[in-house]
Image (spheres, rainbow, N blue to C red):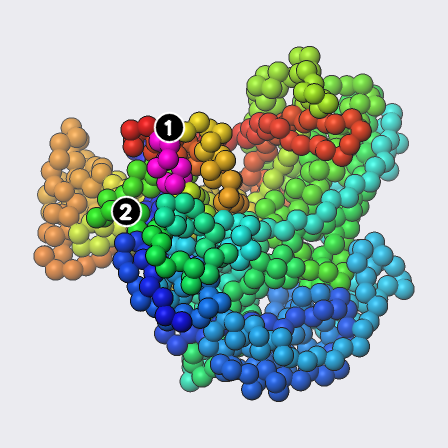
Amino acid sequence: MRIGLTVNGELHELEVEPRETLVEVLRERLHLTGTKEGCGLGDCGTCIVLLDGSPVNSCLMLAADAPGREILTIEGLAEKGELHPLQESFLEKGAVQCGFCTPAMILSARALLDRNPAPEEGEIKKALSGVLCRCGSYKKIVEAVQAAGKKMGG
Amino acid sequence: METRYVGKSVPRVDGLEKVTGRAVYSVDVNLPGMLHGAAARSPHAHARIVRIDTSRAERAPGVKAVVTGRDVPYTFGGMVKDQPFLALDRVRYVGEPVAAVAAETELQAREAARMIRVEYEELPAVFDPREALREDAPILHPGMADYWHAPIYQGIPGTNVVTVRKLSVGDVGRGFAEADEIFEDEFYIHPVAHTPLETHAAVAQYFSPKDEYTLWSATDRPYRLSRELAAALGIPVNQVRFISTHTGGGFGGKGAMVAEILAVALARFTRGRPVKVVCSREEELTASQTRHAAFMKLKTGMKKDGTFTARSAEIVWDNGAYCSLGPDVAWRGVLTIVGPYRIPHLELYSRLVYTNKEIAGAYRGFGTTQVTWACEAQMDIIAHKLKIDPLEIRMKNAYVDGDLYINGQNLQNVGLLETLKKTAREIGWGEPKPPARGSKFRGKGIASVIKPTATPTDSYCFIRVNHDGGVVILSGAPEVGGGQKTVLSQIAADTIGVPLASIVVPQSDTHYTPYDMAVASSRTTYHMGNAVRQAGEEVRRKILESAGRILETDPARLDLAEGKILDESGRELLSLPALMDKMFGGKGGSILGEGHHSPAGSPLLAAFPEPRRLRHFCSYPGNKTFYLYVVPKGGDVSADLETVLHAVPKFLDSKKED
């Protein structure tokens, strides 16, 4: 089937199979491999992208359900080569280790900070609870989100 | 030495590609013409393969190759060569790969793999290593006597024991006779899955005219795996090239070939098209590797005053179907079941046993974790019975500088007493227990650990300075998420005297980067760090000698700092790029340095000359305390707060302090 997907502000006309998930289309057809697929079951959260600003597990969503929605992946976050404050803070605070969960963490945090630029620690933890970090960087990640919120005027 | 970067908090050098989603992991590798592979796996724990019918799979849409053990009749294993690429005559665990398919898409490959029909004749299986030791137990590897194994990994053919490791110190009989009290306890610790967020994945490409394989893999030990694979295939190491990708979590589990073996088996039959194999989460959890479960018996003799007289320990490791790195885990357990304590008489006995379960292999701690649980739990049992404070009994027996560790190593910079004291202070040891929270009662615990490192082992590197002063570190130690590239860059920047930003560390590639044993065993910063320092010193010396010639000055009066040639007063005479320009007459050129580090020959290791005993030597003792909430009647025990302190002479990156 033919669909139009708006990813990172760009419209892509694609021929996909009805069973293809959004993560498959992003990774295999659009080569946006910053979005990961760690389990394919909606458990690990590494496939999270923003759909009209809200985090979704792209492994649980069919690509065919996404037309007409704005999809943001990690590749679309830095604007005109400038890092987003979250990306800067993740670097500054040492919130990255292996980096496999990082795109999903940053996008989940972006959705939170867009809603609430000055979240409490508990709100950050709740907003990021859909993503697992097996290296155990959670503490630094929470600090990075707080620091980014401050940079964004929160 | 004054440092600009070592000991300071710097942003990690591979951070930018990770926060922008540009870092390429093994699951992200995508090559022209690439096919996708999937395995058909055993539903039985132990069975003889009667016949395999692949005909339907071969006709399935998109399928380019179907292989079984007959097509790739090789076995592999760096310590004991016991593992087939694909099951040969029998399967030994549920999930063992029996056949594999390469197809245009992953879905096609998985669907075709399901069409493979295998006829099995079930065999009795054994799931508990203690049962596997019985005389009437089913034998997993009747051909063990014929397996290649490195000389130190001696099994007992005709049984399920693949490795026996023993160590005796002093005379335990005498030690127990001197004891006021003898404690005998048994402990069991379960297997654990590594659960990296990136499942095992690899891409392999075969070039038949040269019988040559190229692999893209997230392993932590590319050089060792290229050697292991070359040995399995009977070809030179130069024909097995490992290109390291980023690693989405390894924790020891990516030191073993899991997806690599399937990709190689398939790539031989796809006419040069690369094959990618990505384990599903289910495959990761059932058919990759686990940490070893272990049964441990401890017999410990104590004086009333809380000092040790003797310990004997017996460890039975549940190895699963193939041994992987288990033989060294069995040895590490021997070396650490004594804890960081002075025990005069020891008799330690460790057996690695096959069972019909998922393979157990390297996992963070490498055996130390399992035995430390037994050792420290018994310490508390002893302290309770002897009515000695658990902190005090540890302090009383703790290693101090100058003690000989059981491998003969002269221990220096131990720091255990200081960390125990500091930990006790931090957690308010001896103060009244915190109040209960509802039905939950709060308690405190303290534990110590001794954690050796696999060494003497070797790390080599090259450093290249480009004609414009940029620095490239060619190291066989891949970045696996722990900050390896950052630490090596910090060391190089300080040693050479160049800005951190002028350094790049490409991922390792066995065609270019020299040998490194592995990014494992907490060894990289020390071993590869020293190799980098040595190579850095060489290029620094060459740069300063050239500067001396060009500036007509004694090089000993010059300094190189942050990419600038300085005189004794700290005045800049020339920038590094300007110097290089003069050196090479405006043309291109490189300055090269090489480094190699191994602690072999260290005077600290002189007490026991027998080299195998020294293979693991002690890197750092540490201790750990924790608060527990315990619900009196239920099983709900949760760690609430942990305080972990290690005695570390120097932190190379200050962010890693906490």
Residue pictured at 12% horizontal, 52% vertical: B581
Against B336, residue B199 (above or below) is below
Is A110 magenta? The answer is: yes
Q: Nearer the viewer, residue B293 or B635?
A: B635
| Tag 1 secondary structure | loop
Sooner in the amino-acid sequence: mark 1 or mark 2 = 2
Q: Looking at the picture, how far across and down is residue B399, in whole percent? A: 64, 29
Pinpoint the chain carrying mark 1: A
- Read off the residue under disc 1: A118
Query: How far across and down, in percent of the image, does residue B258 sit?
Result: 57, 64
Q: Quadrant of the N terminus of chain B?
A: top left
Q: Position of residue B473 (x, y in %)?
A: 33, 52
Q: In the rendered structure, does residue A65 fall within the stretch colored magenta?
A: no
Residue placed most toward the observer, B431 or B119: B119
Place of residue B359 in the rendered image (x, y in percent of width and height, measured from the top left): 67, 60
Q: Quadrant of residue B69?
A: bottom right
Question: Is residue B120 or residue B350 the one in the foreground?
Answer: B120
The crowding category of the residue bearing disc 1, from other C-alpha atoms within 10 Å (few below 14, some 14 to 19, many at least 20), is many
Residue name at image x 49 percent, y 49 percent: A45
The residue pinned by badge 2 equals: A78
Sort mark 2 into few (<14), some (14-19) or many (20+) by Cα contacts within 10 Å: some
Give the main secondary structure of the magenta stretch.
Answer: helix
Check disc 2 and give the amino acid type: Ala
Element assignment for label 2 = loop
Question: Is residue A91 among the parts visible in the rendering?
Answer: no
Say if B264 sits above or below B363 in the image. Answer: below
Q: Chain of mark 2?
A: A
**Magenta residues, start to end:** A109-117
What amino acid is at disc 1? Ala
Left or right of B413 in this view: B182: right
